[in-house]
Image: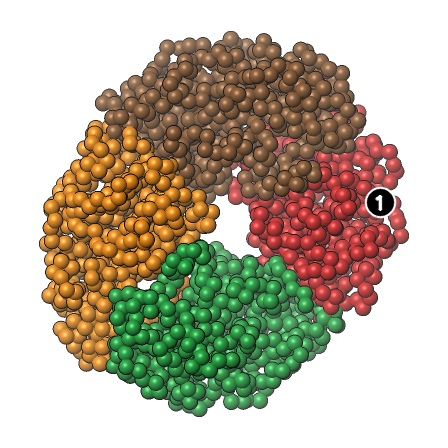
Chain colours: A brown, B orange, C red, D green
Amino acid sequence: MSGRTGDLPSKQTEGLPAAEARFWTGDYYNQGNDQASGMMDKLKEECGVFGVFGHKDAAELSYYGLHALQHRGEESCGICTSNLGGDFHYHRGMGLVKEVFDRDRLDSLVGANAIGHVRYSTAGASRLANAQPLVFKYRGGDLAVCTNGNLVNEPIIRRELEESGSIFQTTSDTEVIAHMIARSSKDLVEAVKDAFSRLIGGFAFLIMTKDVLIAACDPNGLRPMVMGRLGDAYIFASESCSFEVIGAEYVRDVQPGEIIVLDRNGIREERYAVLQRRSVCAMEYIYFARPDSDIGTINLHSARKRMGQQLALESFVDADIVTGVPDSSISAAIGYAEQTGIPYELGLIKNKYTGRTFIQPSQELREKGVKMKLSAVRKVVQGKRVVMIDDSIVRGTTSLRIVNLLREAGALEVHVRITSPPFANPCYYGIDTPDRRDLIASSKTVEEIRQAINADSLYFLSKPGLLEAVGGAESEYDRGLCLGCFTNDYPTPVEFEDAKATSCSCD
Amino acid sequence: MSGRTGDLPSKQTEGLPAAEARFWTGDYYNQGNDQASGMMDKLKEECGVFGVFGHKDAAELSYYGLHALQHRGEESCGICTSNLGGDFHYHRGMGLVKEVFDRDRLDSLVGANAIGHVRYSTAGASRLANAQPLVFKYRGGDLAVCTNGNLVNEPIIRRELEESGSIFQTTSDTEVIAHMIARSSKDLVEAVKDAFSRLIGGFAFLIMTKDVLIAACDPNGLRPMVMGRLGDAYIFASESCSFEVIGAEYVRDVQPGEIIVLDRNGIREERYAVLQRRSVCAMEYIYFARPDSDIGTINLHSARKRMGQQLALESFVDADIVTGVPDSSISAAIGYAEQTGIPYELGLIKNKYTGRTFIQPSQELREKGVKMKLSAVRKVVQGKRVVMIDDSIVRGTTSLRIVNLLREAGALEVHVRITSPPFANPCYYGIDTPDRRDLIASSKTVEEIRQAINADSLYFLSKPGLLEAVGGAESEYDRGLCLGCFTNDYPTPVEFEDAKATSCSCD
Amino acid sequence: MSGRTGDLPSKQTEGLPAAEARFWTGDYYNQGNDQASGMMDKLKEECGVFGVFGHKDAAELSYYGLHALQHRGEESCGICTSNLGGDFHYHRGMGLVKEVFDRDRLDSLVGANAIGHVRYSTAGASRLANAQPLVFKYRGGDLAVCTNGNLVNEPIIRRELEESGSIFQTTSDTEVIAHMIARSSKDLVEAVKDAFSRLIGGFAFLIMTKDVLIAACDPNGLRPMVMGRLGDAYIFASESCSFEVIGAEYVRDVQPGEIIVLDRNGIREERYAVLQRRSVCAMEYIYFARPDSDIGTINLHSARKRMGQQLALESFVDADIVTGVPDSSISAAIGYAEQTGIPYELGLIKNKYTGRTFIQPSQELREKGVKMKLSAVRKVVQGKRVVMIDDSIVRGTTSLRIVNLLREAGALEVHVRITSPPFANPCYYGIDTPDRRDLIASSKTVEEIRQAINADSLYFLSKPGLLEAVGGAESEYDRGLCLGCFTNDYPTPVEFEDAKATSCSCD
Amino acid sequence: MSGRTGDLPSKQTEGLPAAEARFWTGDYYNQGNDQASGMMDKLKEECGVFGVFGHKDAAELSYYGLHALQHRGEESCGICTSNLGGDFHYHRGMGLVKEVFDRDRLDSLVGANAIGHVRYSTAGASRLANAQPLVFKYRGGDLAVCTNGNLVNEPIIRRELEESGSIFQTTSDTEVIAHMIARSSKDLVEAVKDAFSRLIGGFAFLIMTKDVLIAACDPNGLRPMVMGRLGDAYIFASESCSFEVIGAEYVRDVQPGEIIVLDRNGIREERYAVLQRRSVCAMEYIYFARPDSDIGTINLHSARKRMGQQLALESFVDADIVTGVPDSSISAAIGYAEQTGIPYELGLIKNKYTGRTFIQPSQELREKGVKMKLSAVRKVVQGKRVVMIDDSIVRGTTSLRIVNLLREAGALEVHVRITSPPFANPCYYGIDTPDRRDLIASSKTVEEIRQAINADSLYFLSKPGLLEAVGGAESEYDRGLCLGCFTNDYPTPVEFEDAKATSCSCD
């Protein structure tokens, strides 16, 4: 099929060299770094949304809020503001929040309501057209939309819209939603509900007109969204860590199938779908969300530490030190160490300065041992039996590389412990996963993977163990997880013609 | 009505300070400079388009072609390329052609067909969303469009489209056209013809899909477009000066109401409107087009020189030197000097380095005589009776300033001669004119204007004189001019509800 | 005395607002971030040097090596290369290594020998003139010099040089050394030895001509420098962490008073001063150096962990969690937790994206709780008795702020444990310390400090405890520390007229 | 001898490809453009200086003044300010005045005295170290120096200084002068006089300390400098065009061998050399200076017009049109047209947007006729006998190219008329000329040159004709010209060992 380059790219990545299109761009705060590597294979980060209703400093709060969500997307960002009944003001740009906005920009974004977005980093060229919020004019006036997640049936809906004369300037699900809203003859809230009723997937949405701000989650609550208060204002965000930095108070998670409407009359909490058991993406717990965020009542650092403790219970190994792959597995490593009494040590260190523009070493230098981002600490691991904690194994290439780093630095044994079950199936809800055939766990046994990554032993956290760790929390509700990537059992239909996997709808 | 800021601005400028929104941004190659002044009141430049069909270096040729059209738009530019049947590749950016494209960018724009655009400079913030070509996905696949001109009935069509569910991401006429094409159930060429049949205004269009490149002009030929050949390739451009730089051969002007279709089968020259007498914008002859461009058989430097000669015939004045306001009136001044025998001298000089980022002097320094861009050459004008040739008087503030510059440098007398009739009416076809009430000629007599600009005498070229000067050319056809801004007699209806004046459709 | 602004600044900071001149710009990898705060008061980072002799990829190795030393200086960097007998090639710029160099730049830096530098971030304007290596022409040809540290008697030597006709373009010690070398009538190595014999202070130098590369340390070994091998090439660096990334092998530390000369004849290890007991800057162990670096046989993560363990032995407190102030005190916090059995938790988190261009919240928002960089994790600390580990207390304002962050997040008690003795005296050897009167420990008792920082208890690691922790290593030699900032007992004379404290010679 | 790259380059260009090192970078306002060409061979521009003594807006006046001198140097610029007795403030950068300075920068440059500089564009890499004013610390405090011109005996003096221990960070004459001043035991003015007494060459200097501003010219007045008044303030500049833009009044030219000292006691006009007949560089009249500048009583546009008239008298040719090579030869072409009655036409046009970053067409496209900067106007020249006026022929390659452009556009005959005698000898006073062997007039007769440039006829203005044209002015003094490049008869000794030709001392 046809793709294209430019600032309106196709969502498909087949045109890109695999090495470029798929390598790891995320750990919890410095994704993008690994673009330098070409050897990494971590999961791609999704996006983050942030909204304010009713605060005179809406733009500035969004700036700090999005900054706290920066780990969810480094490629581009944007903020759109409005007063009730007033004009839209917005700015979007390529780069980090701190790079895209300066004081003058922020000051120009007047209004008490705002929605903002951070978009994850892709390997391709600069693509400002994809920066969100997208802003449209339609019959009802101005409309701004931003999303995190993926619509499984987007190709079907898009084709229908094209057949009836719609044109698209981006490949984003966001634009599809805007078309659906504009096509409806109902009022905005009903139009949004109608549109959402047709959507299948995992998503969190913020929608703003000059009169209304709407927050909504998919019917299964796959993508997280939290609601908070700051004085009289309402705040919405992908993660609660953004509340702490602006001094907002967490109120509750937005529920599956819920649509929250804020306008001159205050707040209305409605539903467009019956309440189901929540199925939060397990990888949010394991890897994506910041450790200082909470999902429901569960703090993620604590959950990850319990994953490490659970791993220790399930798979103790006699060793000299425990080390975590930074940054995402530090918490779990400390948990493993606490549980076993084996000392936690800094066996691996990541250079925080590596980033987009970093020059990749020549093949020759790489073969000679030039490392870019992650290095093993020789004095710490030399002559030691090492337990190495990581969050997941995707292709296996990264794990192999890290195990070898430890061995080259003198580790006697390397025992790999993973804080999730084997990742054997694609995600349909916004995580940019490789094709199934590239997922090492889809075709290899644990023993085969162990050999492939050159480990002395390998253990994956059991599904019950994962649930137990997450469920250090009180309620059944909080423990509802989507485990599709481990189990191939998804909370929604996924088998459509053209159904989209492996990408975030933000793209 | 509602406006908004951001990268999707409203076309209306009422939100902007008048001084910012309206001052002169154009002379024939360095518009934008006068933004520093706040005192200028020249007409805003329009845009330029450039297209290639069937040349392996389509992007590079577009680069040089757009560079030659840079005077028509300095704010942003873009190129979209494709091979027949292939994918689109494109890049757009803020700034000059040489700033937006580098070798890597050009090399990434593969394909034998291309359309490109330069957009005029506005006073507001950076607005990449308005950069053209706009690129869409629609039922038929990829669609790229770029335009120069203005659709008078765009608001009516846009409202109709919104009523039936269309959403808009820009305020450009270009997007309206794309919607009209996408809504049609006919094939592309018929859809374009249908769409064009509904348009009222002055415009030049280039449209590209993976199969077809289309060039078209409005039914009156208000905005110029020329066709050329380079080997087997076809070239289209707003002005012929761009042919010379790439070594292309001029073939002919695209005719009023004509639509030229290039595809695998070669070239088809069709019409979507009956052929009328051409009404080329007179200001293209007087001011906008580069002096080395031709319209039809007429070279613009020669036409302007004849305007100067005609002025001399109509309004000789005994003086010591003739000087032209640079850069646009140099040719006319030389014509005036040749006709009268009064020596042409460099009485006014413009600093070519002044530009976007130039710091404006403080009020205090300005009052003390700090000049920014234009200065009088004291040794040349001191003690002299000066004939000062200019192309038009819009508000009169610039003329007053220049006359005073000459007087402060010691000119004994300043006789102003203008190479056009009084500019008393707005343009509806793409020139960004002030409101009628701000046009000095709409309310003042020539004598009153003379007083307002502090000249010893003032004369405007007569309408017959202008036609005579332009008609140094052979054919009646070439002399067909739109003189609406002088006569208030326009070649199309202009009195619609919401009819748009004073802006270029590219915005 | 006279100061000046511009790219040749005075070293003195009295002209700067205290808040600007002195706040914290360093933790081990993201210093500069705290410039946004205005509330921080951490010690300023020094600089880092890196050299290669005899490797065809000298520039590229320097790039990776300096990148690994980036935490020692974020303001500017540079690399100068040469082949034996060949021309110099160099490039310097403002910003991070990855920002200043691109592939083209690196490729232009041909030659098998290189010296490079990273310079610490200052609050003032852009100062490219201070970027190192400095490159001179002198009688002997080209000369490149870069340094880390501070010369105590620089003002005296500078005055002597000025009196005899020298001119200075920077305020750097580096230029002083170059003058001294140029004034000597001896050969280069002897000239360098003579010059070094006159220097009093703490410094590490790399000097390059087209024939020779010289590495040297001050007579007390205050500033660290290590030597390594990569194949046949020699490598020098401020810290060993840079060896790991390029695959180089650590050989040994450069000794106090040693001068190592590399030329066509190979390596010569000489001395310009008798060997003394080494006095490595204790703050390198406690705070500056990267945890994966070693000094002598001591790994710094391990040393810091032992500091935490030692603190636990000296000052146990019954608490619920231990947390470290990121990033420098994580290792020590883990040590404290291991020793006490109190769980280590992520009670404080730092946003890694904060940096130079980050917009500071308005006073109003800050008062309302907007945080910039560091935030407490509510779910982790709420209702808990917290042990908070930090490396030092300089003014006390930062500690107060962090304690309050923890209290606002619900901590019941906050017990502060510091991995160093009270910092009561200025540094004369390259750490940019505040005036003595601004050091809280210079005038307050521990109890007074405890009150000032609002802690429930406060304890500073004892001097014997610090030595014990560092001396987990085998040799007496490795334990030789400069403790001047704690004890006011310095390894060199410091009482000169005009003697310089509080700055790094690189400035 | 050894050269080097980097920001401290050698003045020698032998390391550069000839095509890069030597092509035309100057016409009177847009030099640098031709770097894109690789085919040009115009003379390199020199530099420009500007100074203010005693005006509260010294920095801002310097900004506008340097902007007016921008044609003398586009590579870098700088301003240094001071109040009497106060600190220095300065800023330098790569690029145009408008790019290097913004409002904040200007506002930070406080003080009533200022000196500033624009430096000419070179083909090499970014070289900020060469940007002037250079600022030093020496025994007497702060010292800022900027120059235009070249010291013939600089290598001898530099070697002496190096032998006695001086180090150099630039290759600029300016640094040599600073060393000479610093080495002197006398007071500043006497030290400067002593230093100048040793200098041989053509130069204009501005020197500033916190107490004094000094302006000086070489003993022969080779490089121009003018003095003006603005209220009570004194202004100095390379050209008078900069006075007009700031509203300053021209007072007089600085005389050969004069040194003007401004301090608390007012102005002192002294000499360091006996007054000789002035020998202003003839190329300033012919080509370098802006047409709105005056030298002495002579306006340069007028002088150039007279050169054209004189050419017409000396070498009339029957033709249809006269055209000038833009921009420098327009004035002369108008003079030729006026004298002969042959119409002046715009036969050649230059694209003003071409510049540093412009992409050079591939060889293939160039051969196919893609032009970059200059193009012939077909409609104007087709079928015409053309007189083409240019200012000089250096290598001949540019002339050949332009003649061919005209022929390809249909010119029947091309008659080249040059407003200077044959350029057969290098310049030693600041014009960056090619080696003598590359000067076409050094080895070819006029007839041979005519053949080489493919002209139908060729004539060079005679030396008496040139003097006559310049001497349209009243005084003998004003007519004193250096004609060394035409006559090989120089006003100073030039035959030193290592004597420098072909470069500006600013480099």
Note whether C199 is above or below D414 in the view shown.
above
Residue that appears at 22% across and 73% down? B335
- What type is the residue that disc 1 sits on? Arg
Residue that appears at 37% across and 28% down? A174
Residue D500's spot in the image, x, y percent? 61, 75
Q: Is residue D484 left or right of residue A159?
A: right
Residue A388's spot in the image, x, y percent? 68, 23
Q: Which residue is mark 1?
A: C278
In what element is the residue under mark 1? Answer: loop
Note whether C378 is above or below C497 in the view shown.
above
Farthest-out residue, bottom:
D476
Note whether B82 is above or below A196 in the view shown.
below
Kindly identify which chain the residue marked by label 1 belongs to: C
Residue that appears at 35% across and 81% down? D308
Residue that appears at 28% across and 63% down? B292
Residue C470's spot in the image, x, y percent? 81, 34
Q: Is residue A80 visible?
A: yes
